Amino acid sequence: MFSVGEHIIHPGQGVCTVMGYEDAPSPMIVLEAKSGHARTRLMYPVSQLDRLHPIIRREQAEALIADYDSLECDPYTERNSSLEETYFKKQLKLGAPETLRVAKTMRRRIRDAEERSKKPSSYYMRVLKEAKRRSIEEFAVALDVSEEDADARLHAAAVAAGEIPDN
């Protein structure tokens, strides 16, 4: 069981805070998710707690940022872009380091397509946006900093790795 006040990864929402537990009509964990500027309360079945997991610890977050350059892109490919998108969206449900790996993979695929004078698949941008959102939320909580600071640190790591231009 998770403790009240603990931050966890919800597969659909990303970072949530455990607000409590309720027994009626069936055992539920009460979660609060931050969606943009609003907060949403969720009821999640205790019977499915195995689908929730704690966020990364500060040490893990620091190590991922420090070693960002050596983080491998996900090699998964599929002829059908819809199946590929589904695969990467499933990876996002796992939290860091997978959210970071998916963001790096999507940036690489976008850059590779552009270097070949091709238009990148539209799903790349959708998945990249969600991967960045989830990474920023989780790293902000793990590092106990604002989302802006977490975004700046992740951006700096991507710049240092030569993945994106410094601007």
Image: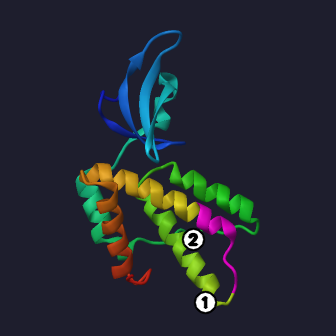
Residue 10, horizontal then vertical, whole percent: 47, 40
Q: Is residue 101 above or below residue 38?
A: below
In the displayed structure image, the side of residue 68 where residue 58 appears, left or right: left
Residue type of the residue flagged with mark 1? Glu
Pointer 1 or 2: first along the chain: 2
Residue 57 rendering spot, x and y as whole percentages: 27, 50
The residue segment tinted magenta is 118-126
For the point 58% across and 61% down, the residue is 127
Where is 90 relative to 70, above or below? above
In terms of secondary structure, where does tag 1 sit?
helix
Q: Is residue 50 magenta?
A: no
Seen at 54% across and 54% down, the residue is 91
The residue lying at 66 percent from left, 77 percent from top is: 120
Q: Is residue 114 left or right of residue 22?
A: right
Mark pair 1, 2: CA separation? 19 Å
Location of residue 72 with respect to 163 vertically, above or below: above
* Residue located beneath label 2 in the image: 75
- Could you say which is closer to the camera, residue 158 or residue 95? 158
Q: Which mark is residue 115?
A: 1
The image quarter containing residue 65 is bottom left
Q: Is residue 67 left or right of residue 103?
A: left
**Residue 155: horizontal and vertical position, in percent?**
37, 71
Please name the amino acid that badge 2 sits on.
Pro
**Residue in the foreground of this view, choosing between 104 and 164:** 164
